[in-house]
Image (spheres, rainbow, N blue to C red):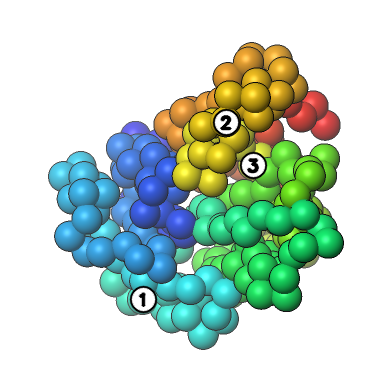
Amino acid sequence: MRLKGKVGIVTGARKGIGEAVAVGLAKEGADLCLVSRSIEPDSELVKEVESLGRKVVVKQVDVGDRTQTEEMVDETLNKLGKVDFLFNNAGISKPGMLWKITQEQWDEVIRINLTGTFNCIQAVSRPMMEQGQGSIINVTSSAGLLGTIGQANYTAAKGGVYALGKSAAKELARKNIRVNTIAPMAETDMTQTIANDPKFKEKYLERIPLHRFAKPEEVAPVVIFLASDESSYITGQIICVDGGMVMP
């Protein structure tokens, strides 16, 4: 098992990519702090991770609140002893055309997607610096790299995540902390609007050389690799798990 003895935090863990990645990490031997605003200790995900023999901490956290992210890390340290990696996955979408986006839509998407990513990086970086190692995996999207119609707030936030990851990678490398970013295009609740509209779906699929969306389980191996020692000389990079939609 590639992650035996390692401890990680997964935000946005309740469903979709976060859920699939959490199961994949547990199968590879990692003990986990599973984080979401609405995750429950008796959820099927928690039961599945525990059935694999892993230790689990369950924490309801609003990542846009700095105090809550600090408490998340403190509880992981107290109950699991350390933090080797963070999968910074929590995110929301509140679409709208540029001229219709409300102040609330703008503020909340930036707060969760960008500020939340920063809060989690900052909170885990301190214990990682003390232990002299760590891996942080952030999540952006094709929207943050290319722009997209009807999601100016989401695009701005995810573009910020990409830029933030590069800066964090340069700052934290001296402490042997690696920071990388993935850009997935998977079937999740967030992409249901696309997947359920035949015309909209076909338009997207025309842009994807493999002509399909990923399953959340297809994202997990990339995260496992970046969390493991197999990627010990990789930092500041972006990996697009999108069937060739973006080729940086």
- Residue farthest bottom in this picture: 67
> Residue 176, position in %: x, y?
65, 57
What is the quadrant of residue 194 in the picture? top right
Distance from the alpha carbon under mark 1 to that under mark 3: 26 Å
Viewer-closest of 200 and 229: 200
Q: Earlier in the sequence, mark 2 or mark 3?
A: 3
Q: Amino acid at mark 3?
A: Ile
Q: Secondary structure at mark 1?
A: helix
Mark 2 crowd level (few <14, some 14–19, many ≥20, 10 Å Cα):
few
Q: Secondary structure at mark 2?
A: loop
What is the quadrant of residue 52 in the picture? top left
Q: Earlier in the sequence, mark 1 or mark 3?
A: 1
Label 2 or label 1, whichever lies nearer to me, is: 2
**Vertical comparison of 93 with 40: above or below:** above
- Work out whether residue 156 can be spotted: no
Q: Earlier in the sequence, mark 2 or mark 1?
A: 1
Viewer-closest of 22 and 151: 151
Q: Amino acid at mark 2?
A: Asp
What is the quadrant of residue 78 in the picture? bottom left
**What residue sits 54% from the left and 46% below the top?**
190
**Vertical comparison of 40 with 248: above or below:** below
Mark 1 crowd level (few <14, some 14–19, many ≥20, 10 Å Cα):
some
**What residue sits 57% from the left and 74% below the top?**
64
Q: Which residue is mark 3?
A: 182
**What residue sits 64% from the left and 42% below the top?**
182
> Residue 180, position in %: x, y?
67, 47
Q: Quadrant of the C terminus?
A: top right
Q: Which residue is mark 2?
A: 197
Q: Which residue is mark 1?
A: 75
